[in-house]
Each structure stands twice: as structure tokens, then as C-alpha cells.
Amino acid sequence: MSVGRRLAPYIGALLVVGHILIETAHSAGPTPNPLVCTPTLIRPQTVNKDGTPGKKCVFPFTYNGHKYSTCTKIDHDRQWCSTKAIYTKQDWAECLGTTLYGGGPGKACVFPFTHKGKQYNRCTLDDSASGKEWCANSALYDGKDNTKWGYCSYGSQGYPLLPNTFYARLQMIDLTANSSANMEEFYDRTKNRATVKTVGLLVPGDVTTFYSSFDTGELYIISDKGECEVDNLTESGEVTFPFNVVKGKDQLLSPGAVLKFGAAYESAYNGTDNVNGIPVKKWKSCIVRPDLNNITMEIDFFWSDPEKWSPSVGTLKSVPVMAQVYANGYDDSNNFIEISKVYDFGFFTDVLPKNPNIFLTPPGVFCKGRKYTKPSPALPSTFSFRLEGLDTRAGIITSMDEWYDFDYKLFRMDLKAEPGTGYSQFGTNPVSIVHDFNTGDAYVIDKVMGNCTVTPIRTGFAADTIMLGNNLTRIRTPEEFFDFDTYQYQYTGQRSVRGILCDTWIANRLWPDENGFASTFEWYFAANNVTFDIGAYNEANEPVMLVIDVPTVGVHLQYNFYKFSYSEPALSVYDISPCFKDKPSRMFRFALKGKYHGVVDNDINLFKYYIQMQVQQITQLSPLRISDVKLDYDSAADLIYVGATLYDKTSVIGSVTNPVVQQDLDLASLALEQQINSANFSVMVLTHDGKVVTLNAVPNTLREMIRTKSGNIMFTDGVKRKGRPSCSLSTPPGDKGKNFPILPDTFFTRLEWTQITDNQTIYLEEYFDKANDIAAIKATGLVAPGSTSLYISNFATKEFFRYEDTYCEAISLTSDNELAFPFKVVNGSDFVLSATDALKFGGTRNETYLGKDTIDGIAVERWTSCTTVPDLGDVTIRIDYFFTDPDSNWQAPSILPPQVPVYSIMSGSGSDFAGNFIDIYQTYRFVYFTSEIPASAYEDVFQTPKGVFCENRQETKPLPSIPNQFSFRLENVDKDGKYITGMDEWYDYDANMFRLDMKPQDGQAYSQFGTIPLKIIHDFNTGVAYVIDTVNENCTIQLINTDGMDSVNLGLNVTIIRNPKQFFNLDNFPFYYEGQRTVRDIKADVWISKRMWPFTATDQGWDAFFEWYFTTDDWSGYLGYQKQEKSMPIRLEVNIPELNSNYIYNIYKFNKDKPDMSTFDVTTCYMNRAFRVFQFQFSGPYIGVVDVEMSLFKYNVMTGVEILTGIRRVRLQKPVVTYDKQSGRTYFSLTMLDKTTLKGDVPLPITETELAVGALKLEAAIKAGNMTIDMLGADGISVVTLRAVPDSLQEGQRTQDGRIVFIDSKNPSKLCNYPATVGGLDFPSFPPTFAAHIEFTNLQTNKTVYLEEYYDSVNNRGAMRAIGLRDPDAKSSYLSNYKTGEFFTIEDGFCTVEALDNSLSMSYPFKVINGSEQMLTANEALKFGAKGYKERYRGRFTVDGVATQMWSACASLPDLGTITLHIDYYFTDPAFWTSPVGPATQVPVKAVITGAGTDATGQPIVISQVYKFAYFSDQLPNDPGLFQTPVGMFCDGRTNTKVVPTFPQHFSFVVEKVDPTFTIISSAREWYNYQANLFRFDTKPLGFGDMASYGSNPLRVVHDFNTGLAYIMDRLVGNCTVTPISLSGMDAVTLGVNVTRMRNPQEFFDLDLYPYYYEGRRSERGITTDVWISKRYWPNDLEGTMSTLEWYIATDDWQNYQGQQGSKVIPIKLQIRDASPDGIESPTTFNFLRFKADDPDLSIFDVRSCFAESAKLLVKFTMKGKYMGGIDKRLSLFKYLTLVTVETSIDDTATGFRVVRMQDARVDYDAVTDIIYFQFWMLDIPKIKGDVVYPVKELSVDDAYNKLAAIVNAGNFTVPFTTDFISTTDVTAVANSITSIRYAGNKNSNKPGSCVAPPNMKPVPKPTVANTFHTIFAYNNDVSQSAMLMEEWFDQDNNLAAMKITGTMNADDVSFYLSNFNTREYFSIDSQSKWSFVKSILYHKLMYMIDVYFSW
């Protein structure tokens, strides 16, 4: 039975009055008379099918097996009824109805009636404005007299109708259970939805919410812990909240039917009354309950009287006030049933709250079994996005950019690593990480330093990686990337995030991986109507946010997505060229036959991609190793020239299962040549007109470009080939030279073993630890391609473990060294050799020293030897060994011995024993070598793999012992079924008891009890099992199962409890010690065993491997009362290979303490059986003795009772201790259970003491004074004896209302003699924090006000919300901030602030402060606990059915005149009533204030008020906004308690703008440098505003406030527009007519001029923020509207990992609203992310593309200073400071040269001489003038250079540089080192900066050249031994020319130059950031030569 089914009666009550039934069965006493209910009714008129008057309806009548008490529309389109008790086809009639209201309650319709000349025979919808049927109550209705008509009702006379939408708060009071529950109901029939929130419905304090889903017919039941269950709304033909079934389809009930108010039952008007001071009208209904043996229920409904009372909220004239339900009768078993309930409506309105989420299940709540109504979004295979990551627990903000390409198996992520995270070992600089899943390699590129690290892809990196075990990975699919795999996501509706309307999905899954913790993943995707205008085109349905909650470990992660874009294939994004600067590479060129125009140029990027893919298929290289694809063409010959660079493979062994076989670079080159020459290289492309064209490579056109040692470039005719070494034994050995190196005793190495003759590469990892006598080799691809095998040598145990293809065996280890590469034979079995053995390192092979060499750029020393291999036959091999050169400066990446192996080549041949030829050619490349073994190896490598059982291994360590009693929590992970279950277990072998708490799963043990949580107790003393339903609290008693986890079957169903070893399955089969592993971060000893599963007497099962994890001896647990030392079980893993099943059992909270017998409480099983409750008293001290050791006291007393009575401890339960201060007595009560009548089968059953005998023994012992308890005294030393008071034993008796009352067992009549009034009880006081819902009724004004009050004295604050206080429907809020002494009043959308004092001048419910009324708190208004009131206890009273205690007080009000008040206070009686917030809580229920007198002027005053507490709790809601002014609410004049932080002088960020008006989301990136007066923003124009005229392409805009100019660059086309800065810019301040200046940081963020007030803290995007608000004109004072600006800035405890330096000030959000009350609803939102305050970088403001080449001057000079360890750490800052120094050196009072005209600064260095080379471009004066405040005359580029040259040449140029902003180091320019070069202009000019031709170079006649050509040539300089490679394209027909130069400054440097004669523009692009000054001289000479000898 599901929770939903169990809650069905509760659910019905939520909106169906009378359906909450708690039946009380009476088995003895006088026979009560059943209720007789006979309301006076006016039955509806009827009409037959032929129109004649029909017979009277018979109620109730039966139709299709169901009873109806009113007319119905079931199976008919109009209301009808049966005219007989049982319906027949002939006996029915159509109901005509009665009037509901309009002519007085209960008036009947008159049929026919005439209206507007038309006759009506039934109710009609004509002219009905409300859509409800109506009728006239007279024959003629003229439409004027409203008393002559009414809405129709069918069976309820004059009963009010509920609206189609309503919101209600009510209290359900159950008089039979002495309890109450609070409810909130939200009902919306217009959209078919409803929600009910309850408090205390199931148990006190419980909060349960019910959400209905009409579309799916589901009910979601959600607890306050976020637990959710799903139930079906449909039960055939029955009403199931809030639906009924019509023709098999759920239909939302009308409001009347929901509340059963006058719809399904006949209701008779019953006059007027008064409820809590409110005038009401009453109706009575009678309901027959066929499900309860046809008992009759009587329901009284109370509605406010519209003639005397007006509701404070909504449009209704009458609202429900109360309903009372009473019934009694006999059930099918003849038990008497009694029902008595009160439903008290504290609030009711037809206006729903403006919260769209009230009908949605809460965020983060997953409802198992919920129907899937909307599939998760389809995901592209390629995309990119910007991500903001929030760790709310750690308070950390990170950001990253990510690119994903599933087709290419590539992933890239740019981020700044957090300390302690996966990539923090690479430092804190921003890095770019590229994952190549083709090879398993990860490339980590430092974006500041430019260096690169290559590693295997980390298996713990989960963003893009799936871990496959054994450190292997693969790329995630798009679904896996977004965690949409494996687990289905439930659609939960639409919510707003960052102002964006989103569709949301949620799933339960494991985090961070399949072995992780249970968590919820909640995805937010933008809804269909939201447009993102961010990329090159508009997109929708993009991810917006992901929230991950992991409750068990307290993790809450939030990921905000920005700039999500679907990307085309673009391998250039994954550029890893920095990782190959020092690696071998080969450059090729070949030709394709075909057309370029119209074919290739249709999509050049796609064509390049096809080229890369074709090369990849041929060469078997990773796509990343194919780079720099370039194209050229010859239109005349129809040839397309393709160039590409192939990189060598990395030396890293990747971490993918089936890596793309990475060919050696040489072999790949040969393969490419072969395929091109054999005409097998072709590419298919799509033409402009949609045709597919195949382009084939021209055979024999492949050319390789090779750079010689002197730097020259030469072309080979094909591919350069390499040979291999060989030797002969007859060759005499060379000079032995140096001694051959020996490997260390401890090392770890990775090898790439390539068998070239077999075209096979095997990856090896070798671990050797001589100190611990252990070694291991891990091989990939040895047994079979892709396979992983492991070989372990344990010299301590003399065991060799071979693990291959899931099979493991242990073999005796010997020292035989017979050789068979790569194995040696031991006892006839192959053993894998170590590297030392295999390569004969240190052997007697006559190694000869050959000198020094270089391998892969590493300086090495080389040895060689020749040897024979007799075990292979007649084979001779040569081995070349390469070790690092200890004399070189080579720096190792790890801790190394003096020399380590780098490379080895093994080459040889011969014949085997059969005479067959053997060819050996193998290489061993040592990818990694260190003398330190990774700590993980001792778990992962030196031990057999987890879960692997190795045959024939030895037993080396015994299992730990298990105690006789323990408890633990168990988590069962079923990897096959993909589910997790949990249970708690208690075991006591000495007491023969076991308990299991669990929730059964379908098909498993105890599933016959459903899926509700169970408590199962096994008593092996009796053989009886108690199965307790923990929700319904029912119990089943049965025999203990013989096959349980705790029982042993002895045959014939006889069981005993398992002993501890049997309990943990440690018996029968041997366990073998494997070693130590870490599980859940705990060090554990591990044992493994092979045994049968399942455990059967016949051993008929499957082989299973049991692996036990116990904590090591150095771990201690503090989980119980005593320290748990050594060997606690923490995990069991069971693997069943034949079934492919794996189960994990995680053990938590293992506690060796003896379980308290209260653990085995079976009292629930005795609710309908014999049990007795006793109470007795102890004399002796309580304070300091009993109260400090309460648990021990209870244990001692219960043990004493067990000894004295012979009743076993399991039958003694429910100990309760109370203390009476007046008598000084300690009261102790307990429940004594009878023995069970069920007999179990156990070997030695005990004899149970009868209950009656035990009771007599207890009474006798207490009477004789034999019940004594020894306790430790208050001094902690002495022993105190407490003795039970003789004759104090009282037995509890249950009263008719279910209470337990203790009376003298000898005189039960005392129960009825208590006095009516008892004095002496202290008046209750309110708790320091509380939340209350109050219905405040002023009887003098006939007005009810609804209040919510929140009070927090701990933090000195209070809040109150009121509805209807000032005007009907008006909502107001009142906040008291006692820290600042302020009182805030928020009414009608406005806020006022007044001083707060302690004045109690009252005018209910206000107090007057400085002449102004302020809302009182309930505590003040009711004078609860106020001094001088002398409250007097009056006794117990019942209020609305609630048992209460009452106090009264009298008070005077001198501030109002001569007035006396009488106040009655009612609080729940904790002894007789359970409130919704808990049984021990005494809460206010009601207060009544009456008073009279005269005011100061003598006028009479009468006071009559009622305060009804609908809800009260000492726990405040988890809503930080309760005590804050509402979002967007500006309160002028408030005290500012916190200053807005100061923003830095330079920063950058990304901003997302959410415009609710146009539902458009746009994005921009901005850079701001106030010191340099520069601003840049990158954006995409939206089609309106300042940028609209520049089109829709993405723009880069730079504002130079030094000159007042804006540079607007089209990022796609590349053109530039220069204009004055716009006066309305976000960065500009207008100072007059077209004059601007730059905003300072505070102005930039609109933090100037107008004061900002601190509001408090709020959570935004999961980030805790401080919030400030201001009121100002926006966007500016001249053109703006009055608006509120609300800033959200991250609190100081949040850490920013979003840049190189980060920022302590982190803006998160700005919201701007119209200041009018309506503006709060639709703010414009700006979300900020990636806010960084890194070192200023002027290259960001690069405007060179806006200047002609003639306006540019390249300036170079050298400086003296340390680069490494200083400048390199903050290179950007050094560049910035140098350029600023240039600016300040040139500037004077009249002229200047601004930094924006200095661009592309580059730095190179010579570490030996400490020389720093610095160069930058100087730009000439812009031709357009801007308007700024203080214009400076701009110097020309030549004049500026002259001034700079004079300063540098004089040695006066010094840059003060700092890395820590504390100490500075001067970096001074070398005198006379400055030079300049201009690339265009007058060649005869001798001005500085011009390029003058050498006199010996004369122009030569220009050769005749074709109009269109492409050429490649090399320029070599023999003096400097350097060269440059030139490529030139010329197209005179299209007025275009281009040049590419490789090697201008170093071998890797590339520059591009483009001339567009159509636009008369010249573009210069440099690809590298470091230049060499010396080599660049050649560049200028070359440019001169090209210009003279080969003019374009």
C-alpha cells in the first residue's frame, strides 16, 4: 500500500470536508445510538423527457453501484436524478434546480418563466455574465429586480458557490485525536491545477505538500525533507482529490465539489450565528458513507453573512468561515465509530498569490514514479558555452569556457584552476585544456606563460570524461555530457532563472560518478519563446542552469550557462601547437585537381576539415596532429595546392580504451605519400549549386619541406626516409668509455614499446620497489589490441600474479632467467620481464660507450652492445641505449637518479630452431621515469585488482574478529538494477535480538507489505518476527524467516540467530588478504573469498567473490559511547561473474555499543492487544543527577523493573521521565507488554512471564521499597540512591477521548473529582523566535484582517504582513529593525521609514510613535507576559474543539483615556492536545479582548477584538527575505548600514542582459581601464540603439577618452569606422555640447550622485550577495525615468577564481525597475560573470586595423633586467608599465602621445646576458577629432619617436616594475639601442623610422609575371644561419594580394600581410607574441628586397 493510498483519506480532507476520518473503535461499555441527521431541504424540481413535470428526486439513489445524494451530470449533459432508490432506465428525470441566492436563501425556481419575451423551462446561461446557470423565482423577470433571480443549485438550497480560483488557509481540528493540522490550499480550476500544503497532518511538526497534475492524473506528495511519492488521482467512479472520473477521464472538480459544499450533498439553510466574532449563515448537510457501513455524517457549514460582514480580501461577498463534521455508527465488525472534526478557515480569497511556482513541485525535489510528460531537449553534437560554477558550501565562484565536439572526439576548456582541484598542479594562471579522446592525451597550455604539459586524460575529470576502469576513459556523448544518460529526467514545468523563463527537468542520479552519492540534477533550458541574440544567429532552447544537490555530503553546486552556441566543425579551436614547439614535425604540400572558385571557396573551413579528415584516415594520426592546413590554387591549371604540418606523437600513454593507433611520424608520412602517388587520396565537396564534386590528389606531387641545421629550407622529392642500426658479433667492441648506468632500486617508468616489424605498439608501466620486495608491470595491448594485463612479483611471499583477460593466478616465484622477449621462463611458465631484464641493462653484454647525442631534444649519452638470444634460436641483436647526459642542463619533470633511460633500439635477425627467418626491430621509448613510485600504485598496481580472485594465492593475514553486538547503517548499491537501497540494522547476539529498518523493493523480501518503510524486529528467544509499518503504525506478527540475513535454518523451520561471523558471511570459506585500499577516503584492509551464491544448503548457486573492507588498525571510530578501536567493517563487494552482477554494501556508523533495548520497541504491535501503562515516583535529587544522566537513569530503572518482574526487556518500553518542582518528585512511566500468543520454532524457547504476574510483582516491589537506583551525585564522585516512593504506583487509564490518565490503582474514582480551576501555573511566554498566522477580527468595525507575524529577538528584528488592514485587499508589510531603530511601512507599493522606540501608546492594533501609528506585534497588542498584568490561571477550556489552558488579566490604557481591558488568553494544553508543531509545544490559540471607557475628550470607547491563531511555530521559515524590504522596494531616508564597495580602476566582465519587454537575451563583454582612459566592449547589435547602423555582425568597439574617439570594428568583415564617442554611452559622461569624459568606476556602475542603501543579504544564482538599492533617473538625468537600481555584489567570503588575479569585489546582478509600484513586476536584469581585475593589458584595446600601413611605425629597443622569476610572472603588467612609461616620457604640458596609439607590445629575452628585447607599434594621429575636456595636442608618430629616441639613447628610460606591489625593480633601456622601421612611405626619406635602401642595391627590370600566380620560395641568410619561408598569392583580376612569411623572428613565427586594392587597405597580422630583435632585422631587409625586386 503506497503512501498515497494511505494518505487518501487525509488528501480527501484537504479539499473534501468530511473525508478525514480517524475512527475510534469501542469494544465495551453501553451501546451508543447512531447519529440521525435530518436537515430540512427544498428538493429541486424535475421535468420528464417530454417536458412534463417530473416526479420528486429520491436521495440518496444508486446508479451503477454508486450512491448519489444530489443531482448529477454523470453520463449525461445536464443535471438529473433518479426518482427511485435504485435507478432504472424509466425512473429518472431532469433536475430544474433551485435558486442559490438572489431572492433569499432557498427560494425555488419558477418554471416556466419569461425573460425578454422568451420562455424558459429550465435553468439557462443566457445573459449570464458569470457563465453560471440561473433562473427566475417568479413567472416574469424583467431584468431589473435582483431579488427575482438567482444562480441555480441542484440539491442545495441557497448555498453559496465557491469561485473557480481560490487561496485558503485553514486549521483542521480532530476532536477524536486531540490534535490539529494547518493547511494552505491553492485551487485553480481555470488551469486545472491545485496544491495543498499541510503542517502536522501526519505527525506533529510534519510539513507535507500535495500537488495535483491534471494532465497526467497524478498526485505528488512531498514532505518537508524533500521526499516525494506519486499516487494515482483516479479511482474508478470515486471522487479522488480533486478530480472525479467521467467516461474514464479525470476531470477537475468544481470548487463546490472540492469542498463538498452544497454540490454532492443536500444542504439545508439553518439560520445565522456568530463564529469568532464574525456574523455567519449556517447550512447543514447529511452524508451517507457507504465505505463505513452506511453511517451518516452531519456537516455544518458556516459562511460569512454578506449582509453584515465584508471580507478583507478578494471579490467575494461571502467566504467560508468554519465547517463542523460529526458522525457515529457501527462498522462491518460492529465496532462503534465516532468522528468529530472542525475546519477553521483563517483566510480565504478568490485571488491567487502572484507566485507561478505554487503549483509546481519544489526545485530539487525528485518524485520517483512520476510520468515523463516532456522529453529532455535534443542536444547537438558540437557546441560551446561559457560557464559560471558556484560551490555554495565553499563560497567559491569559478568560470570557464568550453568547446565540445563529439564527432571529432575533442574537448577544450579554458579556466583558472582552483587550489586543490584537478588542474591546480599547473599553477593559478589561466590555462587552456584540450582533450583528445582519439589518443587519450590531455594538453594543458598556460595561457600566460605559453608553456604546455601533456598528460593522459585524467580519469577523475568528469566534465567530458567517462571512466572505464583501469585509468581508461572515453569522451562523453552529448547526453552524457549534460548528464541526460542512464537516468530519465522528469519534466517539472516552467520557472524563471536570471529573469529567463525556463523549462525544467529533474533526475535522481549518483554524483560525482556511478560510485558516488545519491543526488538530484535539475536542468533549466530556455523556453521556446525566449530568443538568444548572442552568436552569429539567434538560437533558442539553450541550457541556462544546472543545480546539483548532494544532501548526504552537504554539497550544493550551481552551474550558470551563458553564450551557448551550436558550432560548426572547426578544428582550429583545438589548437595545440604550443605543445609541439620542441617536438618533431614535418611539413608537406601536394596538389588536387579541380576548380577552386565555386567549389572549394563555397566553404573553405569545411574543405580544410575534409582535408584533415582524409589525412587522418590515411595516416592514422589524431586530428590534432594535423595542423596549419593552408590552400592555394592555380586557376589556369585547375590545381588546388594543399599544405599541412604533421606533428609527432606525444610520449604520453593515453587513457582511452581503443586509442587511435598513433603511427610514428615517419610511417605516417610514408603512408600519405603512398596514397597520394597511388591516386587514392580524394575529397568530396559541395558546390554552390548543391552538386557533389570529387577532387583527387595529383600523383607524385607530394613535397616535404625540410629545414636544415643552418636554417635553410629545402624540398625533398617525396618523403625523407630513415634507416635502423645493426651489428655483428664479429665486430670488435669499441672503447668501453664510461661505465654503463644502473637503474635505481626504486623506480616507476612508462614505456612505449614499438615492434616495428609487426606494426604494433604496446604501452608498459613498470613499478619496482626493491625495499619492499615487490614489482609490477602493467601492459596495454600485449595480450590483444586494447587489452590491459597486470603482472605482480611479490618477493616477500614468493608469489607471481598473472592477471590477463579477467583471469588471475598465483605462481611460485623463482629466480630462473631464461630469456624469451619480453618474457622469461620460470618452471615452464612465461613471466613478463622487467625493463632491466628485457633491455639487458647492467648485464654482461659488453656495452660500449658511443658518446653524446640528442633524442627528442634531450641531451643523452649512448651505449651499444651485441648479444645472442639462444632461447629463440640463432639470433643476434644489437641494443642501443640512450641515457640522459648528466653534464647537460636538462631539467627533469620528476625526481630522478643521476642518469635515466630515454630511449633504446633493439635490432637483429637470425633463424629459429626450425630454420625460419626471424627479424627483430623494436624501440623502447621511456615516456616517463622517476625514482619515486606514485602512492596510488601501492593500491592499484602492487595489489591484484579489486574484485579479482587469484587462484592458489597464500593466506597472509587473518580476518578481524566481530563483536557480539553492534549496529550500523547499510547502503546497498545494485549496479545492475541501477538503484540504491538503505537500511539500518541492530544486532545483539547475547540478547538473541535483531532489528532491521528498511523500505521493501518490488520482488524482494517483505515486498508483500508494499513499499512503505518497515521496522522488522526478530526475537530469537521466541522465534517471532514483528513487522511494523512505520507510517500507518500497524503491525504484523509472524514467524522468523528461515532464510533471513540474520537466521540459520536448522531444518524443519527451526532457526537460530547467526553468530557474528555468520552474520557477515565470514564462515565456511577461506578469505585471503589482498592488501590495503582506500574506500570513502578511509584506509582499509581487504580480504577476498570465493564462495557460492546464494547461500543454500545444497550449495546450488553461482561462484561469487566476496571482498571485505575493514578499517586499518591506525583508524579509530567515535560512533558510539565508547571509542571503537581497530577493524571496523566499511564495505562488502559481491561480484557474480556468471550473472554479470555486482553489489556494493557500504557500512556506515558501525557502532560496537550494546544496543539499547528501546531499539527493539514493539509497542506498536500491542495497540490492539494487552498492554499496561504504569507510573511511579522517586524521591531524591533530580537536578544535577537525573537530568544530566537521563539515558542512564532510564536504562537503570528499566533494568531494575526487568529483574523485579521477570518481564523481558523487549516487553518494557516507552520510558518517560517528568519532574514536579513543587513536590521535588521524579515521575517515571513505562509501558509493559503482554507476551505474544504466536510460538516460534527455536531450539530452546524461554518461558515468558504473564503480564498480570509482572504487574503484581512490580506493585509488590515498589510497596516493599525494593525499587532503588544508584546514580552518580552532582559532585561527580559520590553515589546517590533514588528509591521509588511506596504506594506511588499508578496505572494509566485511557479516557473516552483517547488520553492516558494516571490514577491510584486502588481508587479509580479520583479521575472524576479534579476541581474545575487549578491555580499556580505560570503564564506562558512567547519563544525568542516565532512565526504566526493570525486572524484579527475587530467586532466594533465588523472587519477581519489577516496577519502574518515573524519575530526574531536573537537578531533584533521583526516583521508583519497584513491583508485588508487599511483597505479591502490591500497588502502591507511592517518591518522592525531594532539594531538601527527603524520601522518600515510598505503599503500601496511605497515605503516609509520612521524611528522605532519602545513607546506602548496603543490604539489597537497600532501604537503611536511621534504621532504616527505603527503596527503592533501580537506580543505587544495582547500584552502577553507584560509586566503588571497579573495573569490569573483559569483552568482548562475547549476552544473550537481544541483543549486549551486559559489565563485572564485586566489592564488599563491611560494613554487612550480612562479605559479598562479584560483579556482572555487561550494556549494549547500540552497534556491533552497535540499541536501541528509538536506534542511538547504550548502555543497560543486565541485571545479575546473586551474593554470600555472614555477617551481623553470624554467620548465613550468600546473595544471588542478577537485574535485567532491559525498557525504558530517557534521555527522561522527558511526565507532570508522575511525581515528585509521587498525586492525592488526603495525606502527613502533609511539608515545605510554598509557602504557600497569601491570598484577597482581596471577590470573586465561578461554581462547578460535580460529584457522582459522583448523577451530577448543579449550578451556583451567589456574591458575598462580608468588609468589609461580606455574602454572596450564586444557586442552584437540588436537592430536598435547606437550600434544599429553598423549591421548585425559582431562588433568590437574601443573608446579612447584621451582623444574622444570611438573605433568600431566589424569582427567578421574586418573593416573599421572611427567616430567621436557617443554621448549616451555607458562609459561616457556628457559635459556640454558634444564634450565627454570617461566615467570613473563608481559612475560606470551608476553608484554616484544618488545614495545607495544597504538592504541585507540575498541569494542570487546560488551566490550569497550583499544588496544595495538606489532611486535615480535612468539611463541618465536628462532623458531617463525615475527608476530603482538594485545591486547584488558577492559577500566577502566568496572567493573569485575567474582570472589571473581575481577580484574581491564581484558584482553579480543589477536590476533596474520603473520606480512606480507597477515597475516591480518587470525589471530589466543585467547578470555579471567572469568579473576580473587582472593586470592591465593594452593589447586588449588594439585599434591597428583602423590605421593605414603608412601610419604605423615599428619601434624596438633593448633593456637590461631579469626576465625569469620576475617579468615572466607578470608579463602583461610589464608591457603595460613600459608603454605607460613611453607615454609619460613623451608627454609634456602641451603635447602628448596616448597609449591607445601604442599597440602589439612584444617581449623576448636572453637569459644569459639578461637582455630584454622590447618592440611595439606606434600609430600616427587619427584624422578625426573627438571632443574631450582637456584636449592634448597629439604628436605625430615621427615627432613622438624622436622624443622617445632621445630619452632612450641618453640612457634615461627606466620602467619601475613590481611583481608584488611592495618592492620595485628598475628595468632600464640600453642606451643607443632604439631603432624604428616603417613598412610603407617615401624610401628616399632619411627621417627616423623610415626604411632606407642600402646604396649597393639597385633596382632591376621587373620580370614579366602572370596576372594571377602563387609562389613559395625561401630566403636564407648564411651569416646568421637562419632562413625564412615565403608564400605569395597575387590576383590582379580581383585586386588582391597576400603574403605569408614563416621564420621572421624564430622558426615558429608566422606573419600574414594582405593588400586589398578595392578598399585601399593593408592588413598586417602577427601570430606569435614573442619576437627576436636580432632576427627581425632580416625581416626588414627582406621586405625591402620584395618591394624592389618583386613588386606587387
Image (tube, rainbow, N blue to C red):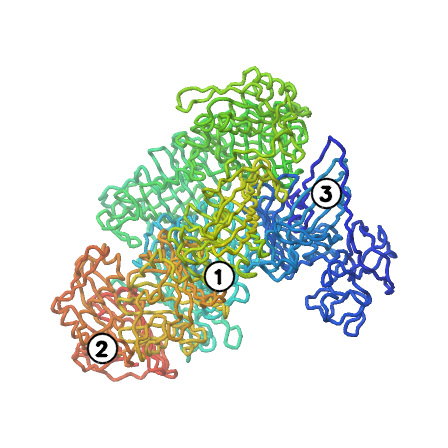
Q: Is residue 210 visible?
A: no
Q: Is residue 1213 above or below residue 805?
A: above
Q: CA distance from mark 3 to mark 2?
A: 98 Å
- Left or right, residue 1770 beside residue 440: left
Furthest-top residue in this view: 1264
**Residue 225 percent location from the top left of the image:** 54, 45
Q: Is residue 778 above or below residue 968?
A: below
Three-letter amino acid code of the residue under disc 1:
Glu
| Residue position for label 3 | 327
**Residue 1471 percent location from the top left of the image:** 57, 35
Residue 22's disc is none
| Residue position for label 2 | 1834
Element carrying mark 2: strand
Q: Quadrant of residue 875?
A: top left
Element carrying mark 3: strand
Nearest to N terminus: mark 1 or mark 2: 1
| Residue position for label 1 | 1387
Q: CA distance from mark 3 to mark 1?
A: 46 Å
Q: Is residue 1248 visible?
A: yes
Q: Is residue 960 above or below residue 429?
A: above
